[in-house]
Image (cartoon, rainbow, N blue to C red):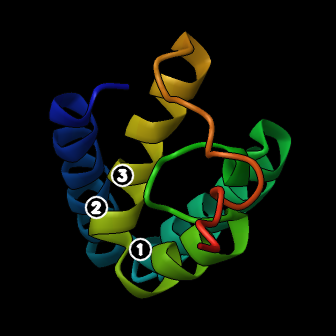
């Protein structure tokens, strides 16, 4: 999902979870964050996120980011995932750059 759609999507999810938490007196927001962070972890592993230039590093880091700052990390992951699926994100360079030992 493009970032300009992922941000409002995450905001609507957060608002809906907050309203549901108040209406049901249940920690719906916590379930949303935990559930989506776990989904991000397994999905990022499946996509091999660490191979791409996303700024998200690896599945573990993006999952921790979802637990700590969900409103930033979750839309960022959705946007990166969208670009990976479309083949728009380049792979990280493999190996070390050549050294100049003169």
Q: Quadrant of residue 42?
A: bottom right
The residue drawn where x is 47% and y is 82% is 27
Residue found at the very far top of the displayed protein = 86
Q: Residues within 10 Å of mark 2 (few under 14, many from 20)?
A: some
- SS category of the residue bearing label 3: helix
Q: Is residue 39 left or right of residue 36?
A: right
From the image, tell me which residue sits under label 3: 76
Q: Position of residue 102 (x, y in %)?
A: 59, 73
| Between 63 and 22, the one nearer to me in the picture | 63
Element under label 1?
A: helix
Task: Kindly check if marks 1 and 2 are in contact, taking CB atoms under 8 A apart as contact.
Answer: yes
Label 3, residues with CA under 10 Å away: few <14, some 14-19, many ≥20: many
Is residue 97 depicted above or below 102 in this figure?
above
Q: Position of residue 73 (x, y in %)?
A: 39, 65
Please identify the quarter of the rendering in which residue 74 is found.
bottom left
Q: In percent of the image, x 63 and y 57: which residue is there?
A: 97
**Residue reaching furthest to the bottom:** 68
* Residue of label 2: 14
Q: Is residue 83 above or below residue 91?
A: above
Are there few (<14), some (14-19), or many (20+) residues within 10 Å of tag 1?
A: some
The residue pinned by badge 1 equals 29
Vertical arrangement, residue 98 with respect to residue 57, above or below:
above
Residue 45's disc is none
Q: Residue at x 53, y 35 (%)?
A: 81
The answer for how far apart the CA atoms under marks 2 and 3 are is: 15 Å
């Amino acid at each position: 999902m493009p970032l300009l759609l992922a941000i409002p999507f995450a905001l609507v999810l957060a608002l809906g979870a907050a309203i549901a938490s108040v209406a049901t007196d249940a920690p719906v927001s916590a379930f949303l964050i935990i559930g989506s962070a776990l989904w991000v972890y397994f999905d990022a592993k499946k996509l091999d996120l660490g191979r791409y230039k996303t700024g998200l590093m690896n599945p573990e880091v993006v999952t921790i980011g979802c637990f700590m700052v969900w409103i930033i990390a979750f839309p960022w992951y959705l946007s990166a995932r969208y670009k990976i699926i479309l083949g728009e994100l380049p792979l990280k360079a493999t190996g070390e750059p050549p050294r100049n030992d003169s």
